[in-house]
Image (tube, helix red, strand yellow):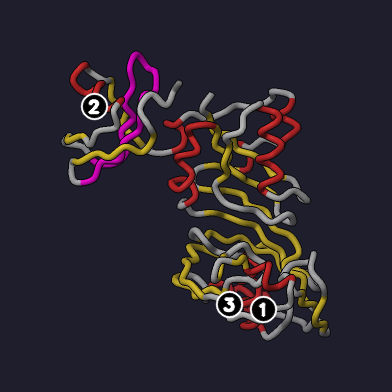
Amino acid sequence: MNEAIIINKEKGYTSRDVVNKLNKILNTKKIGHTGTLDPLATGVLVCLVNKYTKLVDIITSEDKEYVAEIKLGIKTDTLDITGQIIKEAKVPSLKKEDIVKVLKSFIGLYEETVPLYSAVSINGKRLYDYARKGIEITLPKRDVVIKDIELLDYCDDLIKFRVIVSKGTYIRSLIESICEKLNVIGTMNNLTRTKQGNFKIENSYTLSDIAKGDYKSLKIEDLINLEKIELDKILEKKVKNGNVIELNKEGYILFAKENEEIALYHFQNKQGKLVILGEFSK
């Protein structure tokens, strides 16, 4: 069965752990997720089953919303609370208005330094492999976009904020940059992904829910904006063969036959190219 499931990932699991458990629960090997969450993090993890895995790149590109917490006074090697403490300092008293000002200064294009403990590859090796072997390497930088950010709470040594970011944003790196602007040291204490695209945490399910069958899966029209077209005999053969199709259309088109999903195409300049193979409902 092709479906999408919005998982509420629990703390302590890697995203791969979640997929492995779903493999067993759903008795299928082909499952992909649409954006890695660290073991510390919780929240929305969109999982795609069987031929829906071909939608991974589309869903992964959606903006993500997080609620994050900074613990002031310590810095770790991993930039989160699970790492080894490499620096400690007295926590200064901050003014809320200064915190708000600093947070708002990040809205827009932001040059991110990729964390050393991450899965980004340099010269064929993951950065975390370099870290574990103690090999020094220049960390890559890349541009991401901070769409919105707001202070939720500040008390003693904890700062809690909400942020909406583009694909590829590491909240651990953002927190490090926030702390630098505040002239303090701090590390990520908690992180929850509350939304990815249109998928909200309140509409997600735990692995326990899935195991009990207490969940609602999503179909392709729930995942992306598209137009649905019933196939005629002329189009049917072309679609099932994966041919390029000319139509006066733009965007994603789902071709169906008697309400059965057959293939998804992406149309640009009236030319449609196959996204998911013909007869993907089978």
Magenta range is 250-268
Residue at left offset 77%, top offset 69%: 158
Please state if 88 lies on the left or on the right of 270 as rendered. right
Q: Nearer the viewer, residue 241 or 58?
A: 241
**Residue on which disc 3 sits:** 139
Residue at left offset 68%, top offset 86%: 183
Please state if 9 lies on the left or on the right of 30 as rendered. right
Residue placed furthest toward the top: 258
Residue at left offset 77%, top offset 82%: 93
Residue 1, how many percent across, how many down?
A: 54, 23
Q: Is residue 260 magenta?
A: yes
Asked if one can make out residue 150 in the rendered structure from this viewpoint, the answer is: no
Main SS of residues in magenta: strand
Q: Is residue 103 magenta?
A: no
Residue kind at label 3, given as amino acid type: Leu
Q: Nearer the viewer, residue 186 or 153?
A: 186
**Residue on which disc 2 sits:** 238
Asked if one can make out residue 193 in the rendered structure from this viewpoint, the answer is: yes
Quadrant of the snapshot with the C terminus = top left
Residue density around tag 1, few if under 14, some if 14–19, many if 20 or more, within 10 Å: some
- Mark 2 or mark 3: name the one nearer the start of the chain: 3
Please state if 247 lies on the left or on the right of 182 as rendered. left
Residue 252 vs 115, above or below: the answer is: above
**Residue on which disc 1 sits:** 179
Residue at left offset 41%, top offset 39%: 224
User: SS at mark 1?
Assistant: helix
Residue 10 vs 30, above or below: the answer is: below
Of tags 2 and 1, the one toward the viewer is 2
- Mark 2 or mark 1: name the one nearer the start of the chain: 1
User: SS at mark 2?
Assistant: helix
